[in-house]
Image: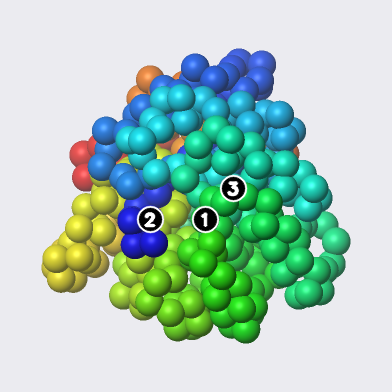
Amino acid sequence: VSKFAGIYVAMYSAYDAKGIVDKERVKRLARYYASSGVKGLYVGGSSGEGMLQSAEERKQVLEAVLEEVRGELAVIVHVGASSTRESMDLCIHAQQVGADAVSSVPSVYYRLSEKAVENHWQHMIDSTNLPFIIYNIPQTTGFNLSFDLCKRLAQQEKVIGVKMSGESTFELEQFKEAGGDDFLVFNGPDEQFLAGRIMGADGGIGGTYGVMPELFCKLDAYFREGRFEEALQLQHTVNRFIKKLLGYPSLYGACKYILNLRGIETGEPRLPLLPVLPEHHESLVQLNEDIRAA
Ligand code: HMN
């Protein structure tokens, strides 16, 4: 299980100028991360806009990523959808094409009981031999994983961890406790990466890593080496960038624009996520330079 610990870029999807999934661009983006030092990629999550794509498109993105970096990077694919059936189909596909693990949020839109969410996840777990990583992101799904449910799920060998995108490091610590030593916790809020690591996270999965993967790898290395003062200083630097990124119409639009500036074309985010406007270009050019100089 510990082979999965580490830093994962929550990868953006890449589209052409018309907004259609562009497999070549997806491959180039995956290749860009292969040389950045990260452990792997988290495909089709919030940053990857999996929820804004058809199942067919999600499969295309995953296939492109695997064709490019299979065996080089660990690839976790988010298969969450409103419909259990669709998620199961994505799990089966993930196994067929050689992903390393699957992960899912609870079903969204319907207000579901804990029992229903557990059943939703269980169907996915049973549909594949791949390891499963729970994705807890209460601020967008309205469902907060309980300690008890985490503990119950973690008893299954296939359930290897949780991506904790809630902001409480206390709950993060509790999930680690619930799952036991073999259970991985991935920090979700990038601006709290160091705090999450200190409270027990085994690594992190984040969207802003996508524009500064090297900085997060360095931050993680400082933590592992016990160089906490340097780690803290670097987290402060990173957070100044994140704060700026959060000031644009959409975080994803801003990050994708920065990648475009680096020659890694990813297109604009899909609506309803807003792209950046021409008036933002100049400040993003500056931000890109600041990140590169850090
Ligand atoms: C994903 O693709 O699933 C996300 O990257 C999840 C991740 O935890 C991000 N959370 C959200 O987008 C809600 C963070 O990386 C987040 O973008 C960052 O901490 C800035 O607030």
Name the residue at 33% across, 56% down.
3
The answer to whether residue 38 is above or below residue 113 is above
Residue 4, given in percent of the width and then of the height, sits at 38, 55
Residue 285, given in percent of the width and then of the height, sits at 37, 30
Residue 66 placement, left or right of 49: left
Residue 154, given in percent of the width and then of the height, sits at 54, 73
* Location of the C terminus (image quadrant): top left
The answer to whether residue 229 is above or below residue 237 is below
Please name the residue that numbered disc 1 is placed on.
131
Please name the residue that numbered disc 2 is placed on.
4
Disc 1 on helix, strand or loop? loop
Q: Is residue 47 visible?
A: no
Q: Give the CA separation, mark 1 to mark 3.
A: 12 Å
Residue 218 placement, left or right of 164: left
Please name the residue that numbered disc 3 is placed on.
78
Judging depth in this view, the residue of 185 and 179 nearest the camera is 179
Please identify the quarter of the rendering in which residue 120 is found: bottom right
Disc 3 + disc 2, Cβ < 8 Å:
no
Query: Label 3: how many residues lie within 10 Å, few (<14), some (14-19) or many (20+)?
Result: many
Residue 274 placement, left or right of 293: right
Q: How is the image coloured?
A: rainbow
Q: Amino acid at mark 3?
A: His
Name the residue at 26% across, 59% down.
220
Q: Amino acid at mark 2?
A: Phe
Name the residue at 66% across, 20% down.
20
Q: Is residue 34 visible?
A: yes
